[in-house]
């Protein structure tokens, strides 16, 4: 039986990963690292409330078989570019460094569709730089998930994002052929795909939104 680590278990995707791992008999322990509690009472859960910007200071606790990195912010929520980069670049790269140091062979990270270190757009460039530097750590089973707009019920209120998601629900019907990759995707589908990939020998490293959905659909 395995031990999984989740970074960002209080977020939309991370909470879905957590819920599924708690029901999965392949896992005996799920370690949570976050600054606020996930408020989940379960015998599998081992929770560490820490400053994720200082993750490397907790290397002795960062042991297990798999790491699910589901942290992420938005430019609206974190308008300061330096702080945004500390979250979306700094935390995943630090996690990869600890995987390397502690011989954790499976690292799964939620990135974003359009990630590109050469992009003129700060958000896409930051994600692309993160992917690039994570891969330099050469963790043997690294998987980078690139979802489109992530849908699902959030605890926090994001009015503008809510409106955009309602528009996307209508617009998704018109995204066919090459545009299909831009369809919004449920956080549950991302979680399902991440756990499947973690437990199978999967060929791709970069997994785009359309492929994420296909993996999740096959798991029904």
Image (cartoon, rainbow, N blue to C red):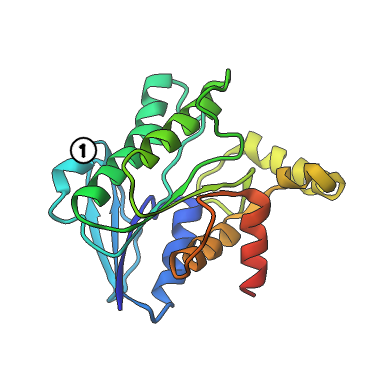
> Quick one: SS at disc 1?
helix
Q: Position of residue 42 (x, y in %)?
A: 31, 74
Residue at image coords 80%, 43%:
178
The residue lying furthest to the right in this view is 174
Q: Position of residue 78 (x, y in %)?
A: 45, 27
In the foreground, 12 or 207: 207
Q: Looking at the picture, does residue 69 appear above or below residue 64?
A: above
Q: Residue at x 35, y 66 (%)?
A: 40
How many residues crowd around disc 1 within 10 Å: few (fewer than 14), some, or many (20 or more)? few
Residue 99 point in image, percent of width and height: 26, 51
Is 77 in front, or is 175? 175
Image vertical order of residue 201 relative to residue 121, above or below: below
Residue that carries the numbered disc 1 in the rendered image: 54
Residue 97 appears in which quarter of the rendering?
Answer: top left
Q: Is residue 116 left or right of residue 7?
A: right
Left or right position of 111 against 220:
left
Residue farthest bottom in this picture: 25
Q: Where, by quadrant of the figure, is residue 48 drawn?
A: bottom left
Q: Position of residue 172 (x, y in %)?
A: 80, 47
Q: Image point 51% across, 68% down: which residue?
A: 196
The C terminus: image quadrant: bottom right
């Amino acid at each position: 039986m395995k031990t999984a680590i989740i970074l960002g278990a209080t977020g939309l995707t991370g909470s879905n990963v957590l819920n599924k791992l708690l029901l999965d008999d392949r896992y005996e322990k799920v370690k949570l690292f976050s600054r606020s509690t996930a408020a989940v009472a379960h015998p599998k859960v081992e929770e560490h409330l820490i400053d994720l910007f200082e993750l490397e200071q907790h290397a002795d606790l960062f042991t297990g078989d798999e790491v699910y990195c589901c942290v992420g912010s938005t430019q609206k929520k974190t308008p300061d570019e330096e702080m945004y980069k500390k979250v979306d670049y700094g935390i995943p790269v630090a996690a990869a460094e600890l995987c390397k140091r502690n011989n954790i062979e499976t690292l799964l990270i939620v990135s974003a569709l359009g990630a590109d270190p050469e992009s003129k757009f700060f958000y896409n460039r930051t994600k692309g730089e993160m992917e690039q530097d994570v891969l330099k750590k050469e963790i043997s089973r690294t998987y980078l998930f690139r979802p489109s707009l992530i849908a699902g019920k959030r605890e926090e209120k994001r009015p503008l994002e809510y409106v955009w998601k309602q528009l996307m629900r209508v617009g998704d019907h018109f995204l066919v052929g090459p545009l299909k990759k831009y369809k919004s995707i449920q956080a549950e589908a991302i979680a399902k795909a991440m756990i499947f990939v973690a437990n199978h020998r999967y060929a791709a490293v970069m997994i785009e939104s359309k492929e994420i959905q296909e993996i999740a659909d096959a798991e029904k």
